[in-house]
Image: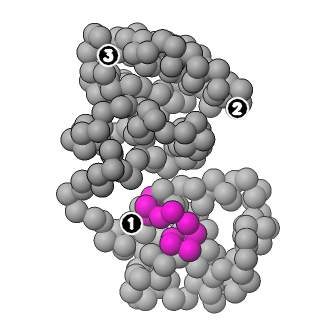
Amino acid sequence: MRLILCDNNRILCEALAAILQARGHRVLALATRATEGVAAVASHRPDACLLDVCFPDGSGLDAARIMRRSHPDTKILMLSCLTDPAVLSEAKKIGVAGFLRKDQKTETITGALDVIGAGGVAFSARLSGQPVRRAAAPAHEDLLRTLTPRETQVLRRIVAGQSTAQMAAEMKITTSTLRSYVKVILAKLGAHSRLQAAAIARRVPDREGATASSGKGWAHARKAAGTSGGD
């Protein structure tokens, strides 16, 4: 991905840039102030911006708000040492694609970039050991309605127990593309595994219109997608 890194710590910014570039990402610019980050996004139009919350010249949340308004195609992944759930809540309202603590492993950050690059979201499940506070947990049926028709097709095959190779072959896509679909599905459903995603799908009542993109209930998934198992 083409990236802008914006963090108030220059050393951390440079270190993260080196790691991400070694893993195939292209870092277009570094910024240590909120205004510099906004300008860099406007100039380079990156795929994503990794953005701190606190800066000497202002708030990263304000910068994110400007970026989202002016350049909605740029995904924003916020990194912060702050543990206040209210900050995360505000970031979600702004429309950022992800929010992680700075003390996460590099693999977590690169994994989050993969998820948001595939169209998903990547938010920390916990802040300083505290569960993220949500106004209300979406109903399973509401979560399933967020899936695109293609994602719904993949989920039906997951429910049917098909392997990655079988799904990719029958859908005529690469296994890499298939795995990208799976990552997005897990992110949208808030699931940590294919098994959990399948369990969520099976809880939806078996009736016409059970999902926004399908006319069949989830109990028909095995008949529609086959019954081969394993990954």
Report the side of 17 relative to 204 (left or right): right
Q: Position of residue 140 (x, y in %)?
A: 37, 73
Which label belongs to residue 55? Answer: 3
In the figure, residue 174 lies in which quadrant?
bottom right
* Residue 98 vertical position relative to residue 33 in the rendered view, above or below: below
Mark 2 highlights which residue?
23
Extent of the magenta region: 188-197
Which label belongs to residue 143? Answer: 1
- Give the amino acid at mark 2: Arg
Q: Which quadrant of the figure contains the C terminus?
A: bottom right
* Nearer-N-terminus badge (3/2): 2
In the figure, residue 165 lies in which quadrant?
bottom right
Q: Secondary structure at mark 2?
A: loop
* Residue 195 vertical position relative to residue 188 in the rendered view, above or below: below
24 or 215, which is in the foreground?
24
Q: Is residue 113 visible?
A: no
- Give the amino acid at mark 3: Phe
Report the side of 226 relative to 155 (left or right): right
Report the side of 19 relative to 11 (left or right): right
Q: What is the magenta segment's predominant secondary structure?
A: helix
- Give the amino acid at mark 1: Leu
* Nearer-N-terminus badge (2/1): 2
In the figure, residue 207 lies in which quadrant?
bottom left
* Nearer-N-terminus badge (1/3): 3
